[in-house]
Amino acid sequence: MKLENSVKTVFLICVMTGLFILVGNVIGGRAGVFLALVLSLGFNFGMYWFSDKIVLRMHRAQPIGPGDPYGVFQMVQELSVRAGLPMPSVYMIPQALPNAFATGRDPAHAAVAVTEGICRLLSPRELRGVLSHELSHIRNRDTLISTIVAGIASAIMQLANMARWAMIFAGGRSSDDRDGPNPLAMLLVIIVAPIAAILIQLYISRTREFQADASGAEISGDPEALASALEKISNPSLLQSIARAGAMPRTSPALTHMYIVNNLSGQSFLSIFSTHPSTGERVRRLRGLLGTGYGR
């Protein structure tokens, strides 16, 4: 299953790259493809080297070390050894919403961040299950994959926006002018390409979450701990109480694919546009691992 998911992910990244090149070609022919590639390489270079610092700063995350009040550092230290990973940096986010994420371009430059809300809500056993999930993202190189996919998707949407403005300013050309791009192709680029890029991005994100759940259960040896944690941090009553207290963070939707659950989205949000699988399905799969060698 892990190999199958990895093959699907590589295939879909290739599809996104092809879509990106196609959009550039529609807009400006060979020159458009060249410009698109240059912009994409520059954008992805910056994301590759600096995305972790940018994300942590956006969340006002603070580094923590041994002796933190919730024992997070010690848990990460122990689980990193079990996972065969270098010790990542550990951060605490001053936020009531229970959540966690991993970031960094590779295992040697990785970081794990948790909110104060998740530390207060979960038992040590459940928190350990969450940290195992995040470490599995690092081990599976999901942090790099999500950066690449988000970068390509963003570039496609920027090109589609360029195409929209190109159509507006080219609206006055005569019908005999055949040097410009095909209007029908431009319209498809503006409408279809961004939607396709987003759907591929979301599918990859959901696939990687399932894989991280399974490999996280392997690292901790306790799938029930993560299942219980997911139920708690996705509880609608809890989220409503946080919202009523005015403690819901102002977080960019572009970052939700990083979190262990997307508890910023409304219940009416269409599941096809969700960055995460349903909590119920994730819990069902995790509990299906009990007695298969992952349980204690």
Image (cartoon, rainbow, N blue to C red):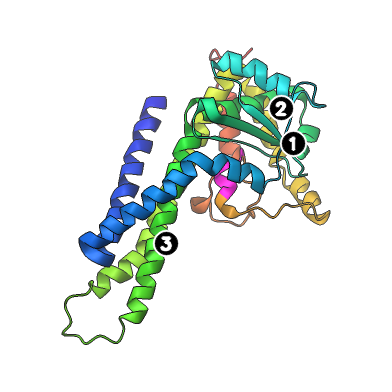
Within-10-Å neighbours for mark 2: few <14, some 14–19, many 20+: many
In the rendered view, tell whether residue 294 sits above or below residue 229. above
Query: Which residue is located at x 54 percent, y 43 percent?
Result: 51
Q: Amino acid at mark 2?
A: Leu
Secondary structure under the numbered disc 1 in the rendered image: helix
Choose mark 2 or mark 3, whichever is in front: 3
Measuring 68% from the left and 39% from the top, which residue is drawn there? Answer: 99
Rendered image: mark on residue 118: 1
Residue 277 in view here:
no
Instruction: Name which residue type carries label 3.
Output: Gln
**Residue at point 47%, 36% (across, down):** 144
Left or right for 212, reference 113: left
* The quarter of the displayed image where residue 136 is located: top right
Q: Is residue 102 above or below residue 159?
A: above
Q: Is residue 114 magenta?
A: no
Name the residue nearer the viewer: 277 or 75: 75
Question: What kind of residue is marked 1?
Answer: Ile
Could you tell me how far apart the alpha carbons at marks 2 and 1 are, in whole angstroms? 8 Å
Question: How many labels sit on residues?
Answer: 3
Distance in Å between CA atoms under marks 2 and 3: 39 Å
Above or below, 38 relative to 123: below
Labelled disc at residue 127? 2
Start and end of the magenta stretch?
255-260
Among the two numbered marks 3 and 1 on one chain, the one whose residue lies closer to the N terminus:
1
